[in-house]
Image: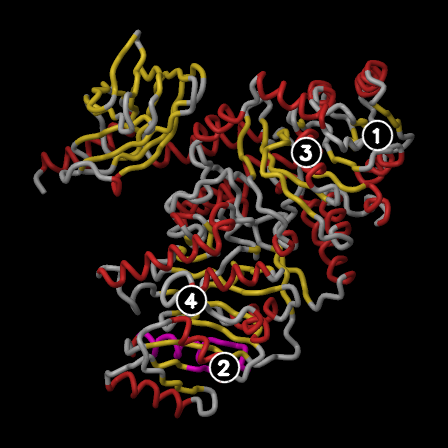
């Protein structure tokens, strides 16, 4: 490379990033755009601008001013010499409603010769002007993101210093990418795309005056209008937060509520003054002044004692409900009056009122609840059940709500989820919303609540803490009876791959009560049979070869093997799997033998230690797709989703364990699906039978995917693949449209899962 080329490709961009050089971009309309009255009008389905002017490759901050009546996604294309294409594009932000000034971070790949920005695909009128680019660096981005999180979360100086210390230690030992990943996990920060994308989502979801009128009219027509008692324990909270909290209840569109506040002997004089003021203004507000401080559980019980509603809702003294929170809950109760527990999505709100870190939750997931308190806010409970379990328990302060939902959920299966943000956690110093690490006692209270749960439910299990991740746990089931596991491995030649798989199983697996059934689907290479003979001699009685010389049909191969399997448990395993964790089998067995569990999967990694599989999301990419594909193996995932063991609609048959009885109960794998989606279909049949499928993220295996089978590149294969897609849409449309263990507010683009859907 010449000195001039090196300067242009490396030194100049690095220097520009260091100096933060700014450039003004000019937008040249190239299709379906025209200017009218100083606003752009898109006139077709492919509006696009060519970005002219100077810009540098690498990380850039892009700023602009915009105005629009609707949210318009912004997509960037880069041409590296072969023209523009969808494979080299990214939706990087959006033009939100109203007038805004926005800044987001984008990556322009090296070698980019032309840059294009497409404002949506629909006809629209908008302003998009003053577009500027500012070169930045990755280290500046990390520091900027860190400062943003610290500022928004209101972290204390002590916690901030702890974060910086841990960050520099990780930076020295693991590099920049790992530092940022750990920082997000440690703070509890879970970003969805760029800040701008969530702001756009919030703007798009805002209730209009028409929406408010519609809701009020609907409330009048409701046949069931239960009284909901909002329980608020108060202690020495700042006046401004207390007022905002109470006002958020008073402003509810649904009027049939009572606000039950218990002051836990606060010594700040404004508390009594403010509470008495509100009680005099609204007769629905009930105040209890406790004589002595008893902490949050006893204070909550004091509020509970004066509650008369059919349901109770839980609200912290510095947080806020959305104006439609109670309406959405009562709307659901009119559809499902049998509901005993209802929970919704939540986000956080900074001292400045900026909303961030939204948690879009799955539907009822009992195994996820044993890993973390995910239902949290906003939740309502049938009061009679709360009374039945004795209310809040002293000694579980900090995780008193966790302890409550664990106990109440044992009395009912009528648990519903509203996939809407109805609650804002205030992120201020010493608030739990500022990160679980701020209040470590909540972590240990959570352990006590889980240990009690194990005893109450007579579970043969222990609780494992997740190091450096407060308030996250794993249940480890013991396997004293050691049932026989039949490991089924279909194969056709590819002897080296199979040999690696078998070697890893026999040399690394601590659980020894297993047999292996190798389903030979027409192998012809001499070396393959040598591998068969090798393992039959090395492990006599443990390895069986089942020969099925038929056209490839994955479902038939596995079904035939299960028929001759001796084990009570069946493990479907690809021949390109390589064992990493020695305890993989006993961990899978522990879950698979649980009565309500269907299929059990694990975290699968590509050889480069990025994720291939951690559960399957229905609808992702069209039919179904792997969650978190290509994320780092060390990434904690969305709200810890890559750390905890959690329920998933589907787990891949590349490594899937199930009780043989249950396998037969749903008639095994569907043989009409010879190649694709047979495991998806199988897991959905289990869901329909009432079983919970689970993915174990504490177990990792390597998956050398695509080494065993070719791509869909012939007319015959394409026709077969399309027929399997048609089958899935015919039989499982409801799951493709709405995966119960995902969330309708999250993206279903195959490369964009767990990103907010704009």
Q: Nearer the viewer, residue 211 or 126?
A: 211
Q: Which residues are magenta?
A: 497-517
Residue 306 location (% of width, % of height) = 89, 32
Q: CA distance from mark 2 to mark 4?
A: 19 Å
Q: Check contact, mark 2 vs mark 3: CB within 8 A.
A: no
Residues tagged 3 and 1 counted as in contact (Cβ below 8 A): no
Dot 2 or dot 1, earlier in sequence: 1
Magenta highlight on residue 504: yes
* In magenta segment, residue 388: no
Residue at 47%, 51% in the rendered image: 617
- For disc 3, the neighbor class at 10 Å (few under 14, some 14 to 19, many from 20) is some
**Crowdedness of circle 2 by 10 Å Cα count: few (<14), some, many (20+)?**
few
Instruction: Between label 2 and label 4, give the one nearer the viewer.
Output: 2
The colour scheme of the drawn protein is secondary structure
Which label's residue is closer to the chain start, 2 or 3? 3
- Neighbours of disc 4 within 10 Å: few (<14), some (14-19), many (20+): many
Label 3: which residue? 331
Distance from disc 3 to disc 1, alpha carbons, whole Å, reads 28 Å
Circle 4: element type: loop
Q: Pointer 1: what residue?
A: 262
Q: Which residue is mark 2?
A: 563
Labelled disc at residue 654: 4
């Amino acid at each position: 490379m010449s000195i001039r080329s090196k300067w242009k490709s490396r030194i100049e961009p690095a220097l520009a990033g260091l100096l933060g050089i700014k450039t003004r971009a000019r937008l040249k309309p190239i299709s379906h755009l025209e200017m009218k009255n100083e606003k752009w009008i898109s006139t077709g389905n492919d509006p696009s601008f060519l970005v002219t002017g100077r810009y540098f490759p690498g990380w850039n901050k892009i700023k602009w001013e915009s105005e629009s009546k609707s949210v318009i996604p912004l997509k960037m294309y880069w041409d590296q010499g072969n023209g523009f294409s969808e494979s080299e594009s990214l939706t990087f932000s959006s033009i939100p409603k109203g007038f805004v000034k926005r800044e987001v971070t984008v990556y322009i790949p090296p070698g980019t010769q032309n840059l294009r920005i497409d404002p949506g695909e629909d006809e629209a009128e908008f302003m998009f002007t003053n577009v500027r680019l500012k070169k930045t660096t990755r280290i500046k981005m990390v520091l900027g993101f860190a400062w943003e999180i610290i500022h928004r979360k209101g972290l204390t100086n002590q916690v901030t210093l702890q974060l910086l210390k841990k960050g520099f230690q990780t930076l020295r030992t693991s590099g920049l990418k790992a530092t940022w990943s750990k920082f997000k996990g440690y703070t509890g920060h879970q970003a969805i795309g760029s800040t701008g994308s969530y702001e756009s989502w919030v703007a798009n979801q805002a209730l209009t005056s028409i929406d408010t009128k519609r809701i009020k009219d609907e409330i009048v027509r409701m046949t069931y209008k239960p009284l909901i008692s909002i329980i608020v324990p108060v202690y020495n909270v700042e006046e401004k937060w207390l007022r905002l909290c109470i006002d958020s209840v008073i402003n509810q569109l649904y009027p049939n509520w009572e606000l039950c506040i218990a002051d836990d002997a606060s010594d700040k004089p404004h508390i009594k003054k403010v509470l008495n003021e509100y009680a005099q203004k609204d007769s629905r507000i009930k105040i209890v002044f406790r004589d002595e401080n008893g902490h949050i559980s006893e204070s909550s019980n004091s509020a509970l004692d004066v509650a008369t509603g059919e349901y109770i809702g839980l609200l912290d003294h510095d947080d806020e409900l959305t104006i439609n929170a109670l309406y959405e809950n009562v709307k659901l109760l009119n559809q499902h009056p049998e509901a005993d527990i209802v929970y919704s999505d939540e986000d956080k709100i900074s001292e400045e009122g900026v909303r961030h870190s939204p948690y879009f939750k799955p539907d009822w997931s009992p195994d996820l609840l044993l890993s973390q308190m995910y239902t949290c806010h906003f939740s309502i409970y049938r009061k009679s059940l709360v009374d039945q379990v004795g209310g809040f328990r002293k000694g579980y302060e900090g995780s008193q709500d966790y302890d409550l939902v664990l106990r109440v959920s044992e009395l009912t299966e009528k648990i519903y989820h509203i996939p809407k943000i109805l609650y804002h956690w205030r992120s201020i110093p010493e608030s739990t919303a500022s990160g679980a690490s701020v209040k470590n006692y909540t972590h240990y209270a959570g352990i006590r609540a889980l240990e009690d749960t194990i005893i109450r439910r007579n579970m043969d299990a222990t609780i494992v803490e997740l190091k450096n991740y407060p308030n996250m746990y794993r249940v480890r089931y013991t396997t004293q009876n050691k049932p026989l596991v039949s490991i089924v491995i279909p194969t056709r030649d590819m002897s080296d791959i199979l040999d690696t798989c078998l070697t890893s199983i026999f040399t690394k697996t601590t659980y020894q009560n297993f047999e292996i059934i190798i389903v030979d689907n027409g192998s012809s290479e001499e070396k393959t049979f040598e591998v068969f003979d090798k393992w039959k001699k090395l492990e006599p009685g443990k390895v069986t070869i089942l020969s099925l010389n038929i056209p490839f049909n994955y479902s038939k191969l596995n079904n035939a093997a299960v028929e001759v399997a001796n084990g009570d448990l069946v493990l479907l395993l690809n021949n390109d799997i390589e064992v990493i964790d020695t305890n993989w089998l006993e961990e899978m067995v522990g879950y698979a033998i649980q009565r309500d569990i269907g299929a059990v999967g694990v975290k699968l990694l590509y050889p480069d230690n990025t994720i291939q599989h951690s559960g399957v999301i229905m609808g992702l990419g069209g039919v179904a797709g792997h969650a978190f594909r290509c994320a780092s193996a060390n990434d904690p995932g969305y709200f810890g989703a890559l750390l905890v063991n959690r329920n998933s609609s589907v787990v891949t048959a590349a490594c899937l364990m199930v009780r043989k009885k249950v396998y037969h109960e749903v008639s095994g794998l569907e043989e009409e699906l010879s190649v694709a989606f047979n495991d998806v279909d199988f897991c959905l049949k289990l869901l329909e039978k009432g079983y919970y499928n689970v993915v174990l993220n504490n177990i990792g295996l390597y998956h050398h995917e695509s080494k065993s089978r070719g791509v869909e590149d012939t007319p015959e294969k394409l026709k077969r693949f399309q027929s399997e897609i048609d089958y899935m849409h015919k039989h499982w449309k409801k799951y493709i449209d709405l995966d119960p263990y995902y969330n309708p507010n999250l993206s279903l683009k195959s490369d964009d899962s767990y990103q907010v859907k704009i």
